[in-house]
């Protein structure tokens, strides 16, 4: 499958922006399931940006800008060739040791209610892969996908208690529960081609778990399935806070307003 992606983050301020530094997690990596055909980032200061691989193997651009009087946009766009590997992630280098993905954070730490849900899943004779599929389905059925009821700081415990959330919440709940089982789990950001070519207001998020014989395998509890050739993986880490697509700080630029639009479609080959 060839996918075409356009991801724009638009910023507007009431007063001039005197200084800003941003860390961009906006560049996919090549591995067995996906290959970059073309990719570019357009943003103020991108020509002088420092680019490097972080400790998880993610491609980062560090951008600094000064004296911006008007609005600005950060645009990541390109074309990716993707194949369906049933969620299996092969030949994607990650310098971090696997054990670091057993670490719980405030965002992923499972509540007693999450552990109770986990305990109700029938594990008799089940392989780990089957168990994680059952967990993925249980989370999808328990936490209804609802936009606007959670935010970037909502924890897995809070979203589970509310019974509602978005893909970030589903991925946090899944990651925390899997780590409780002693299985390393990564939080992942990327893109998903929606049915009918609809645009989205954000990138997508899911999780990956490390399984014997298979290696890292993706699970998308928000949609109840493993990633297919409609998914593009961009970055992986411990939780959403560590790999937010754009992270940074600024001086000036009061009353920031931000708008995000993501379009992912099937491209002509």
Image (spheres, rainbow, N blue to C red):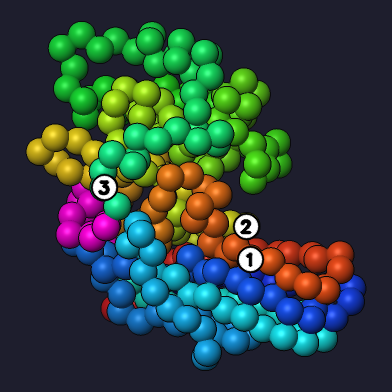
**From the viewer's perspective, is 58 left or right of 241?**
left
Q: Quadrant of the N terminus?
A: bottom left
In percent of width and height, residue 90 lies at 18, 55
- SS at mark 3 in the image: loop
- SS at mark 2 in the image: loop
Residue under pointer 2: 201
Quick check: is 61 in the magenta stretch? no
Q: CA distance from mark 3 to mark 2?
A: 33 Å
Q: Are marks 1 and 3 in contact (CB under 8 Å)?
A: no
Q: Which residue is at the far right?
A: 14
User: Residue at position x 73%, y 64% from top?
Assistant: 258
Earlier residue among tags 1 and 2: 2
In percent of width and height, residue 114 lies at 49, 18
User: Residue at position x 41%, y 50% from top?
Assistant: 237
Residue under pointer 1: 248
Q: Which residue is at the far bottom?
A: 47
Location of residue 200 with respect to 178 vertically, above or below: below
Q: Quadrant of the C terminus?
A: bottom left
Chief secondary structure of the magenta portion: loop
Question: Which label was assigned to residue 97?
Answer: 3
In percent of width and height, residue 34 lies at 26, 65
Q: How many marks?
A: 3
Q: Is 155 or 140 nearer to us in this picture?
A: 155
Q: CA distance from mark 1 to mark 2?
A: 20 Å
User: Residue at position x 78%, y 72% from top?
Assistant: 251
């Amino acid at each position: 499958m060839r996918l075409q992606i356009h991801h724009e983050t638009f910023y507007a301020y009431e007063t001039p922006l005197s200084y800003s530094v941003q860390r961009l997690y906006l560049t996919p990596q090549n591995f067995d399931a996906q290959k970059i055909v073309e990719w570019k980032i357009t943003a103020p200061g991108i020509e002088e940006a420092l680019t490097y691989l972080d400790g998880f193997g993610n491609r980062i651009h560090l951008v600094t800008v000064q004296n911006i009087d008007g609005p600005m946009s950060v645009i990541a766009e390109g074309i990716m060739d993707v194949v369906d590997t049933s969620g299996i992630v092969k030949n994607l280098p990650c310098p971090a040791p696997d054990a670091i993905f057993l670490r719980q954070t405030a965002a992923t730490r499972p509540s007693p209610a999450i552990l109770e849900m986990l305990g109700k899943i029938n594990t008799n004779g089940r392989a780990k892969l089957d168990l994680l599929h059952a967990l993925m389905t249980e989370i999808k059925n328990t936490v209804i996908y609802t936009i606007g009821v959670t935010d970037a700081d909502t924890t897995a415990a809070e979203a589970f208690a509310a019974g509602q959330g978005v893909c970030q919440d589903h991925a946090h709940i899944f990651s925390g529960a899997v780590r409780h089982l002693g299985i390393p789990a990564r939080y992942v950001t990327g893109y998903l081609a929606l049915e009918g070519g609809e645009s989205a207001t954000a990138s997508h998020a899911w999780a990956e778990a490390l399984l014997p014989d298979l290696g890292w395998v993706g699970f998308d509890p928000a949609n109840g399935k493993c990633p297919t050739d409609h998914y593009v993986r961009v970055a992986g880490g411990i939780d959403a806070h560590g790999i937010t697509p754009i992270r940074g700080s600024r001086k000036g630029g009061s009353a920031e307003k931000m708008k995000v639009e993501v379009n992912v479609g099937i491209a002509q080959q």
